[in-house]
Image: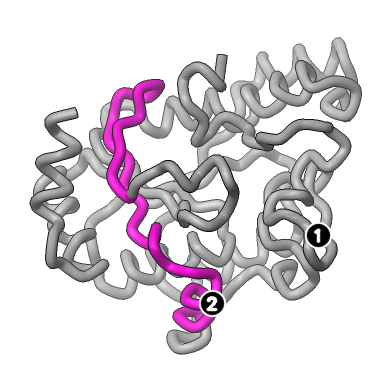
Amino acid sequence: MERVEEIKEALKGLNTIEKLRFLADRYADRIIFSTSFGWEDQAITHLIFANNIPIKVFTLETGRLFPETYYVWNRTLEIYNKPIYAYYPQNELLQDMVNSKGPSSFYESVENRKECCYIRKIEPLKRALKGNEIWITGIRADQSANREDMHDVEWDEGNQLVKFHPIFDWTLDDVKAYIKDNNIVYNTLHDKGFPSIGCAPCTRAVQPGEDFRAGRWWWEDQSKKECGLHATEAEVK
């Protein structure tokens, strides 16, 4: 897409902070960053908040997060004294699902799990992204096999905006080093074998040698374990 190519060209030669500043200036009030308070997102939150870059930061409050995640959320607010906007599921959609199928229907079928992800994450995400032109994410290239064909700047057809992954080329060791060097608060579940942290009922620790996302929806037998937030439009459908 032409806009993607223009942004790629404009970002050439800039460091990570300069890239974020450029996009924040060019797309003022139309740029947003989504955090789930994991390693990568905490690093980007620090880049934004510590350098006073005017990018709105938000999170999806699914109602099923780990206590450790809420702790990181609260400490981040205390440390930077800047807002993180929470987007919740729509009450009626959530109530109808739980009333008809119970609070743990996602264990029963892939369809039920995708329904839960849609209500708790995808629909609130669409509300959060509405009116924005740039979506900043913490995606890295080596996080899972289906992300290796992605690029740091890409067009999101489903949400009709440009996605920018500022630490796309960072390794996990790079992220850990940045967090340590800058004394950034992070989720202690990472130290207990949780490389990817989502909703508590749907996330477990991974064993040595297992795939990065093996701990997400581990009861499902499928090669691509995405909730739909970063899937293609065809995969979401």
Quadrant where the N terminus sits is top left
| Helix, strand or loop under label 2 | helix
Give the tally of numbered discs.
Answer: 2
In the rendered image, the vertical position of residue 134 relative to residue 222, given as above or below = below
Inspect the magenta stretch and tell me whether residue 151 lies in it: no
> Where does the magenta region start and end?
152-179
Point out residue 170 in the picture as x, y percentages from the top left corner: 43, 67
Residue at image x 82%, y 27%?
106
**Dot 1 amino acid type:** Val
Q: Which mark is residue 128?
A: none
Residue at image x 33%, y 41%?
163
Q: Nearer the viewer, residue 73 or 104?
A: 104
Which residue has dot 2 on it?
173
In the rendered image, the vertical position of residue 66 relative to residue 31, given as above or below = below
Quadrant of residue 17 within the rendered picture: bottom left
Residue situated furthest bottom in the rendering: 181
Point out residue 222 in the picture as x, y percentages from the top left corner: 76, 31
